[in-house]
Image (cartoon, rainbow, N blue to C red):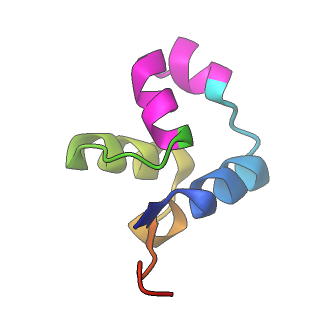
Amino acid sequence: MISYEPLWKTMQERHVTTYSLIHKHNFSPYTITNLKRNKSITMNTLEKLCRILECTADNVVEFIDDDC
């Protein structure tokens, strides 16, 4: 299972809001909804988030074993 819990923590630490992702960085609201629902995103989106937040992929997404 995909979890974007690290993303929300990183955004809070960097003072970046979903509003700024949509209005300043041109993310679609649909992409934000996918993130909130732990749905898949493209590698381009992941790269863009990492550049904006000045972080690595593990600060955005984590993979959780479904068997837990």
The residue that appears at 71% across and 58% down in the rendered structure is 9
For this view, does 5 lie left or right of residue 3?
A: right
- Given the current orientation, which residue lies at the most extreme top position? 23
Task: Choose top left, top right, bottom left or bottom right for residue 49.
Answer: top left
The front one of 54 and 10 is: 10
Q: How many marks?
A: 0
Q: Is residue 28 magenta?
A: yes
- Given the current orientation, which residue lies at the most extreme front position? 67
Q: Which residues are magenta?
A: 19-35
- Given the current orientation, which residue lies at the most extreme bottom position? 68
**Depicted 33 relative to depicted 41: above or below:** above
The residue that appears at 53% across and 66% down in the rendered structure is 59
**Depicted 27 relative to depicted 17: above or below:** above
Question: Residue 15's spot in the image, x, y percent?
Answer: 76, 41
Of the 4 image quadrants, the one containing the N terminus is: bottom left
**Depicted 55 relative to depicted 31: above or below:** below
Question: Residue 55's spot in the image, x, y percent?
Answer: 50, 62
Q: Main secondary structure of the magenta part?
A: helix
The front one of 54 and 45 is: 45
Question: Residue 14's spot in the image, x, y percent?
Answer: 72, 49
Q: Is residue 51 magenta?
A: no
For this view, does 55 lie left or right of residue 47?
A: right
The residue that appears at 63% across and 22% down in the rendered structure is 20
Question: Residue 43's spot in the image, x, y percent?
Answer: 22, 49
Q: Is residue 44 visible?
A: yes
**Depicted 67 relative to depicted 66: above or below:** below
Q: Is residue 24 visible?
A: no
For this view, does 3 lie left or right of residue 17?
A: left
For this view, does 38 lie left or right of residue 40?
A: right
The residue that appears at 56% across and 12% down in the rendered structure is 23
